[in-house]
Image (cartoon, rainbow, N blue to C red):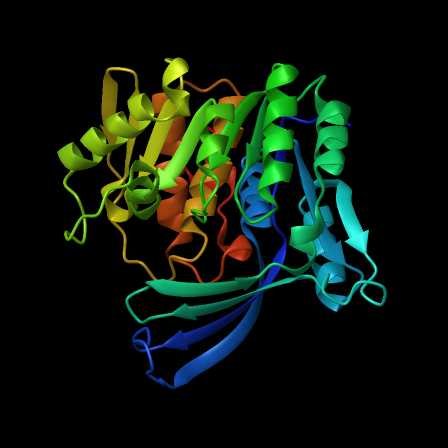
Amino acid sequence: MSIDVIVCGSLNMDLVARVAALPRPGETVPGSSLQRFPGGKGLNQAIAAARMGARTAMLGACADDADGEMLRALLDSEGIDTRFVAIREARQRPEAHTGLAMVWVAADGENAIVVQGGANATLTAAEARQALRAVSATAKVAMAQLETPLETVAAFLEAARAEGVRTLLNTAPALPGSQALLAYADIVVLNETELAYYAGEQSAEPALSLEACASVARRLATGSSSSSRPTQTLVVTLGARGALTICGEDIAHHPAPRVTAVDTTGAGDCFCGVLAAALAAEVPLSAAVQRANRAAALAVGRIGAATAMPRADELGDGSG
């Protein structure tokens, strides 16, 4: 099977509780509903890419439990290649249950998430290298996040670069020890919080201005191990404000459509998956980011993560 995009990442079951406002430390709040949705950054991004028409493969791990079976069935139903999804036997490795995310969603659409990695933490560097080699003849983009072991992500991105496959790293969640991974990526996608983390910035402002974000991103690019890669692109997602792209001296702002957010869970994953699919289709970066903005704007108007990912024909830009 020919592959355009291969995604190395997590597969989770999301337990989503809706609340009036996110609880403060020590506070108990009542939930108005509790639902189960498929999720995990890897699975979300793979589905987002596949719904844009990219031939997509998923590299990850889950358990031989009911949640794992449901997630694999969903990937299959989306036409995603699941031969690289490892199945761990829960009876032999009780800690390797299918990943679980506990999500609180407030009335204004904001969320807070706690992730229990489970089987995601068992994905190995050897499995990543093997999967990449298997698809390297046709793959255009190799994408990863940070919900699988860092050494596995490093091996995946390093193998992709060795095979001439374009690499995209979404630095979510920002983790100690992950800074070195930025050097493996042709494109780094990070939000404002992650940008501040990697750049070592401590800002009292709830949201930096566009100029301040661009300045911090430029300092990150020139002050990190990526400084020897002048063609590396940073993409900073800014929620309702859209996204910034920074490559060398070139900085551009890509506004997002105005929408009313219902649930922002998975919006960043939607952006990344659509961006990867567009780049695999050789869409220029600016147009690819604009497409990703439009897709994410549609996703935040829906409940859930993976199930909220739009399809190409919904974008109205001829991308399908």
Q: Which image quadrant is residue 213 in?
A: top left
The residue lying at 42 percent from left, 70 percent from top is 104
Question: Residue 247 location in percent, x, y?
Answer: 32, 19
Q: Is residue 77 visible?
A: no
In-front residue for pair 26/200: 200
Figure check: 101 above or below 194: below
243 left or right of 61 in image? left
In-front residue for pair 76/106: 106
Question: Residue 307 location in percent, x, y?
Answer: 54, 56
Q: Is residue 251 visible?
A: yes
| Quarter of the image with the N terminus in it | top right
Question: Residue 317 location in percent, x, y?
Answer: 40, 30
190 left or right of 33 in image? left
Q: Which image quadrant is residue 191 in?
A: top left
180 left or right of 125 in image? left
- Number of numbered tags placed on the structure image: 0
Figure check: 155 above or below 297: above
The residue lying at 60 percent from left, 47 percent from top is 148
Q: Which image quadrant is residue 150 in?
A: top right
55 left or right of 307 in image? right
The residue lying at 25 percent from left, 27 percent from top is 219
In-front residue for pair 11/36: 11
The residue lying at 40 percent from left, 19 percent from top is 232
Question: Residue 28 location in percent, x, y?
Answer: 36, 85
